[in-house]
Amino acid sequence: MVEGRVVQIGLLGFGTIGSSVYRLIQKERDQILEGTGVDLRVKKVLEIAPSRIPTDAPTGLFTTDFAEIVDDPSIDVVVEVIGGTDAAFDFIDVALRSGKNVVTANKQLLASRGEALFTLAKDERRHLRFEAAVAGAIPIIKVMRESMIAAGLHTVYGIVNGTTNYILTRMHQEEGDYAEILLEAQELGYAEADPTADVGGADAAAKMAILASIAFHSRVTLSNVVYAGIESITLDVVRHAKELGFVVKLVGAARLIEGKVSVRVFPALLPTNHPLASISGSNNAVFLEGTDIGEIMLMGPGAGGVPTATAVVSDIVSVANTKDVGFLQSCSCYRRLGFYAAEEVESAFFIKVSVADEAGVLAQIASIFGAQGVSIANMIQEGRGDEAELVLTTHPTKERQFFAAIEQTKGLACCRTEPMTLRVL
């Protein structure tokens, strides 16, 4: 076997991702050594849950004491995959101050408390790598930080949550409603026992905060992202979208508008010819637009232990083969841009509402919309006895004007249900 430079690793966490990282290193160790000259070895694993420790684990590999990792001078890289924002922050903080390089997959931590850690990494001249924090096996962080540094990026659209994409894909194929498919996704391991962060949009929002920070070189935190999830999406809505030539997806949208940053996550209708519309199952994709590159899209497996582990291992090898930390020690947020008001963003919308099946209803709604400057693009009306279901799409308008029209529409006597609205990308 080729002799290489040994890189000792301290692994924090042995759940789905941590165990996948360990097994991937064991499986691919020889190939990594042949290709890079780096001999990766996991020396210690921090795990406080006994149920996660394999019965055949090598003696001395596991510990419940972080000091055994951070105080070990032979450990070069600390890999944090425990999740959360409190203990993980403390572990990474101490590791950097102790002279360790760090690799993390923790998007919630970076999106909420990342600035302090990146500043510390820069001060300590240590690596803080995070490819696995967004889109699993897709190397979007590396591409955006290195290859796109002079691309003039102004728009990033992403399908960055595999759980919601799996659910919406199955609903589009009419293989069940939201509740049924969510339960199936949990049984298959695509969704957590508590899926709130995924289906509620918080997971995607954290990832979009990270992508926006890199794309626009200006700090975006989770608190700056307006987000919504897919809990209100019904099979009926998905069917109407299909009739109109759209696919429903949970979309992350980061844009520069008039020199200010807008970052949002929302369920949206995508035209079937949009590049993101074809992303199916648990796959992820990120669509980039820049003044100097036009359009580029990267797609691939975005969830699961093994895809995420490949990104972690790639970061470890990059750290091992980089002589100095260079510009990649920071997240490159050298600007301080303001944020564009969400209500001033222009969007097109889909509306579904049950109304009385009588003359003049559409005219009442059209009058309210027209007074607010909202133009109707398409309409479907289906009679159901003394009720009708009205489905509309609009041309782009400021969201402030659109939602003012919706509030007035709710007050009409002819409306039997509150209007259900979705954005159209």
Image (cartoon, rainbow, N blue to C red):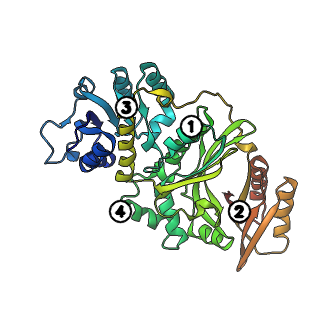
Say if residue 47 shows up in the picture. Answer: no
Which residue matches tag 3?
102
Q: Earlier in the sequence, mark 4 or mark 3?
A: 3
Q: Is residue 18 left or right of residue 272?
A: left
Residue shown at 57% from the left, 51% from the top: 158
- Which residue type does callout 1 highlight? Ile
Query: Separation of disc 4 and disc 3 at Cα?
Result: 33 Å
Q: Is residue 398 above or below residue 129?
A: below
- Which residue type does callout 4 highlight? Glu
Percent x, y for residue 210?
Answer: 53, 39
Percent x, y for residue 50?
Answer: 20, 43
Q: Is residue 306 above or below residue 63?
A: below
Check if mark 1's residue and mark 3's residue have beta carbons within 8 Å. Answer: no
Which residue matches tag 1?
214
Q: Earlier in the sequence, mark 4 or mark 2?
A: 4
- Which residue type does callout 3 highlight? Val
Q: Quadrant of the C terminus?
A: bottom right
Which residue matches tag 2?
351
Q: Earlier in the sequence, mark 3 or mark 2?
A: 3
Q: Earlier in the sequence, mark 1 or mark 3?
A: 3
Taking depth in this image into account, of 227 and 321 the one nearest to the observer is 321
Give SS at disc 1: helix
Quadrant location of residue 100? top left
Percent x, y for residue 84?
Answer: 40, 38
Q: Residues within 10 Å of mark 2 (few under 14, many from 20)?
A: some
- Which residue type does callout 2 highlight? Ile
Which residue matches tag 4?
187
Quadrant location of residue 93? top left
Of marks 3 and 2, the one in the foreground:
3
Percent x, y for residue 91?
Answer: 34, 28
Q: Is residue 173 above or below residue 95?
A: below
Residue shown at 80% from the left, 63% from the top: 376
